[in-house]
Image: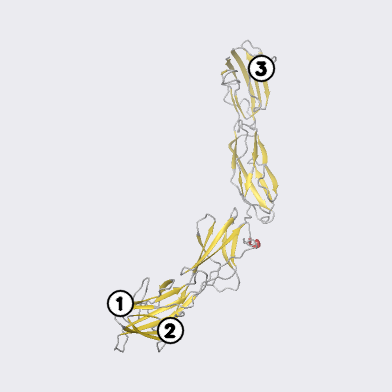
Amino acid sequence: MFCVGAIACCSVFQAAGQFTAPEASADTVTVYLNSKELRDPIFVFNPNESGEVREFGQLLLEEEEAEESDFNWYRFVNDKFEEEPFFTEQAVTSTSKDELRQGGYMVTVTTPGEAAPRDTFVAWLYMNPGFEFELEKDVNDGVHEHRKYCTWTEFYLSRLVTQNTFTYYDPRDGTEHRLVNRISFTMKADNEPEMDIDIMPPLDMPLQITSQLFFHGNPPRKDTDYVFKATDLFGVEKDDEIEYITILPYATIDPPGLPEEDPTSAPVPVTFSSTPNTFSDQNFEYTWRFGNGDSVVLAARPGLETTDTSYIYFRPSNEGYRVTLKIRSFRDCEYITPNETASPVIVEVSNPLLDGTANVFSPGGLNPYFKPEVVSLRQFEILIFTRTGTQIYSHRGDDLRGWEGWNGRFQNNNREAPTGVYYYTLRALGWDDPPTRNPLPGPYSGFFYLFR
């Protein structure tokens, strides 16, 4: 008979029945290379939840024909089944008399009064010994200090994980076969998805060392908890947790601090700050690069949460300035060329602009100042005249943010200028290089109306 399934059966002879092992944890079937048509069950007894290994199991043989028969039980000893049965029972179904140790068992079923067996069944019991699984850790249950690197992360098993091999034999010719209880491994880092990993070197290779490289990967940019799991072929599972306190220099650049008024008009004073990952016990060197060839180097002490710096941009840029931050660890990464460790930010500085198209203003209304649009100007001059040509106001300077505009008063005596038409002239130099004189769009002179 040939059977394969959750409860498998097979025999050298035609048979109508099945072996079961009610307390087995799992089962599989034999693969006899010289008798490929045979498939006998292998019942697996895993360790219990506390890790205690099973020493015994029990088999039950049920026949499809519900009639009383003689059941003769044999053990597989010295490459063959014993000559004499260790247990004989006359019943409809038969259960092994004693709990059985790991190995092979055969039962013949004979009709009363007949000499030759009617059916023959073979089964194997595998008492899975389980395995030990533990990671090497430092005194704080973390990654070993001497195995911390700036460019990779290594985890090690504290002892060898041994794959157990169960040996069984072809009942026809005694050929030895092996079932390797292979162990697979996974790793999960915090909220990342679980991933399959390998031991280096593989478990199948003979080793002369007491520990094995378990995972070799890029170091995380923040403190990370790892869960490593080992699972054998029949569901025995062990896991261990380990913490990696990051030493990888990394930080995020915070949004730059820009002026509230005209934030892109040169000169643009900017404050830069960064938020690092956990730098619990190390010194770091910060290098801010401002995107125009200028840079500054700052030292960060242990426990420092941010490292701020300021810079003033004078030259306009069509693309903006790409500000980057590099961090170097004195202790662990001093021989490693640091990479860019934080996403850059872009600081925009507008091109010079002088727009004199404003033609009306109301000192007591919603538009209380007469002020042409001025952006990124190094020098600026405005003169205001009455219609008869009398100059009543002037402003010269480069502090565009500090100049609110003309408030509608005579500059020499602070009297209110009356409603009417006035004339202005403008002159300016831009912050570009070389400086643009009277940047577009203009006009640079014209009439406007003061309304009260």
Q: Is residue 179 above or below residue 385?
A: below
Q: Position of residue 366 (x, y in %)?
A: 56, 21
Q: Nearer the viewer, residue 112 or 118?
A: 112
Side (left or right) of 363 relative to 297: left
Q: Is residue 424 visible?
A: yes
Instruction: Return the disc, 1 or 3, that comes first in the chain's sequence.
Output: 1
Q: Is residue 233 above or below residue 83?
A: above
SS category of the residue bearing label 2? strand
Mark 1 to mark 3: distance in Å?
116 Å
SS category of the residue bearing label 1? loop
Side (left or right) of 3 relative to 177: left
Per the rendering, the mark at residue 393 is 3
Q: Position of residue 127 (x, y in %)?
A: 47, 76
Per the rendering, the mark at residue 281 is none
Q: Position of residue 178 (x, y in %)?
A: 46, 77
Label 3 near label 1: C-beta < 8 Å? no
- The amino acid marked with disc number 1 is Glu
Q: Which quarter of the picture shows residue 93?
A: bottom left
Q: Nearer the viewer, residue 331 or 422?
A: 331
Give the residue at mark 1: 64
- The amino acid marked with disc number 3 is Tyr
- The amino acid marked with disc number 2 is Phe
Instruction: Return the disc, 1 or 2, that comes first in the chain's sequence.
Output: 1
Give the residue at mark 2: 76
Q: Is residue 362 above or below residue 288?
A: above
| Labels 1, 2: front one | 1
SS category of the residue bearing label 3? strand
Colour scheme of the rendered structure: secondary structure
Q: Position of residue 94 (x, y in %)?
A: 36, 80
Q: Residues within 10 Å of mark 3 (few under 14, many from 20)?
A: some
